[in-house]
Image (cartoon, rainbow, N blue to C red):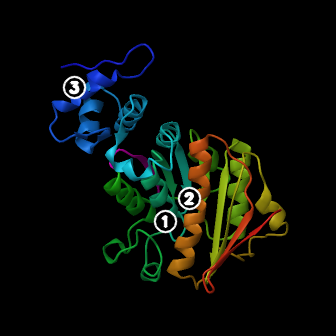
């Protein structure tokens, strides 16, 4: 049996249902399992991500996103699947952010981190395991993302982001996620995102607290918060004492802000969110 895309680039629902019936166990009602997605991608000679988008157009949902159906619209999920996020830093913040975005539906990533995992990372970093010690963070993160979602397109770069290489790394991306570890580096990343016209989601942690916000393309709020940040000014984001709850909690805020923006196709500046896990409490500040 052959299934063809029509002129509107959508599938006929009945033809699709008949096709899926040939692949036993690939479909339950309007939910299509991984085997069905892969069979459709092969039949149409498209990526699995585009196969999921074609299914959504025909009124079907990938089984992996069944629990998201009451939260995301089909159009919103399609926007996520077609998004590419640049994640600078794959440790305490960046690793958690990337994992949450991948599970939420973001379809492609560019990862950048020059470091390797060491034992001090085991207390909080998403992809740090004993088996990963001494391995590049970006590559381990890439493997971890693909193990949870093999349809992803993930590029990993084991290098330090700087003003010279950031434009190339960000090319083709939909947004920038800040998992860097010092204020000067974060300001540099924000400036590069502004120059590239990309939305920027910020996160920083210190001990049991942290900050997060998202800004539309062209924003420079970090530069306003830290106007005198110099090469030696670490401030938030580089404390040697950081725990799992603050890193994961701030990453959840970052991912939530970004998923909401990408799914809607519209980014608006958020409040500055302050998470204090020692209480715990969440505060918001308008600025």
In which quadrant will I find the N terminus?
Answer: top left
Q: Secondary structure at mark 1?
A: helix
Q: Position of residue 36 (x, y in %)?
A: 25, 37
Q: Which residue is mark 3?
A: 18
Q: Which residue is mark 1?
A: 96
Residue nearest the viewer, comparing 223 with 166: 223
Pointer 3 with pointer 1, Cβ within 8 A: no
Q: CA distance from mark 1 to mark 2?
A: 9 Å
Q: Is residue 243 above or below residue 126?
A: below
281 sits to left or right of 242: right
Name which of mark 3 and mark 1 comes first in the sequence.
3
Q: Position of residue 137 (x, y in %)?
A: 44, 65
Q: CA distance from mark 3 to mark 2?
A: 37 Å
Q: Secondary structure at mark 3?
A: helix
Q: Secondary structure at mark 2?
A: helix
Q: Which residue is mark 2?
A: 255
The answer to whether any part of residue 161 appears in the image is no
Q: Is residue 183 above or below residue 36?
A: below
Depth-wise, is mark 1 or mark 2 nearer the camera? 2
Pointer 1 with pointer 2, Cβ within 8 A: yes
Q: Where, by quadrant of the figure, is residue 172 drawn? A: top right
Which range is magenta? 150-158
Depth-wise, is mark 3 or mark 1 nearer the camera? 3
98 sits to left or right of 260: left
Name which of mark 3 and mark 2 comes first in the sequence.
3
Q: Position of residue 130 (x, y in %)?
A: 33, 78
Q: Is residue 157 magenta?
A: yes
Few, some or many residues within 10 Å of mark 3 (<14, 14–19, 20+): few
Depth-wise, is mark 3 or mark 2 nearer the camera? 3
């Amino acid at each position: 049996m052959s299934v063809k895309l029509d002129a509107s680039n959508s599938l006929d629902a009945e033809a699709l249902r008949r096709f899926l019936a040939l692949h036993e166990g690939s479909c339950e009602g309007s939910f299509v399992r991984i085997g069905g997605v892969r069979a459709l991608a092969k039949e149409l000679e498209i990526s699995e991500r585009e196969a999921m988008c074609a299914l959504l157009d025909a009124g079907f949902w990938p089984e992996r996103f069944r629990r998201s159906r009451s939260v995301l619209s089909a159009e919103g999920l399609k926007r996520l699947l077609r998004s590419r996020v640049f994640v600078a830093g794959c440790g305490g913040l960046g690793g958690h952010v990337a994992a949450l975005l991948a599970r939420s539906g973001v379809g492609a990533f560019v990862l950048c981190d020059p470091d390797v995992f060491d034992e001090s990372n085991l207390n909080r970093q998403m992809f740090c395991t004993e088996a990963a010690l001494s391995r590049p963070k970006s590559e381990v993160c890439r493997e971890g993302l693909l193990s949870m979602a093999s349809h992803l397109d993930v590029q990993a770069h084991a290098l330090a982001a700087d003003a010279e290489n950031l434009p190339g790394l960000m090319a083709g991306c939909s947004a920038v996620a800040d998992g860097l570890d010092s204020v000067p580096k974060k300001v540099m990343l924000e400036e590069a995102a502004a120059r590239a016209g990309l939305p920027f989601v910020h996160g920083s942690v210190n001990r049991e607290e942290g900050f997060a916000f998202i800004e539309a393309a062209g924003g420079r709020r970090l530069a306003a918060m830290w106007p005198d940040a110099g090469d030696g000014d670490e401030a938030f984001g580089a404390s040697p004492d950081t725990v799992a709850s603050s890193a994961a909690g701030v990453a959840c805020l970052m991912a939530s802000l970004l998923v909401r923006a990408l799914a809607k196709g519209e980014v608006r500046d958020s409040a500055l969110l302050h998470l204090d896990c020692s209480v715990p409490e969440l505060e918001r500040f308008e600025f």
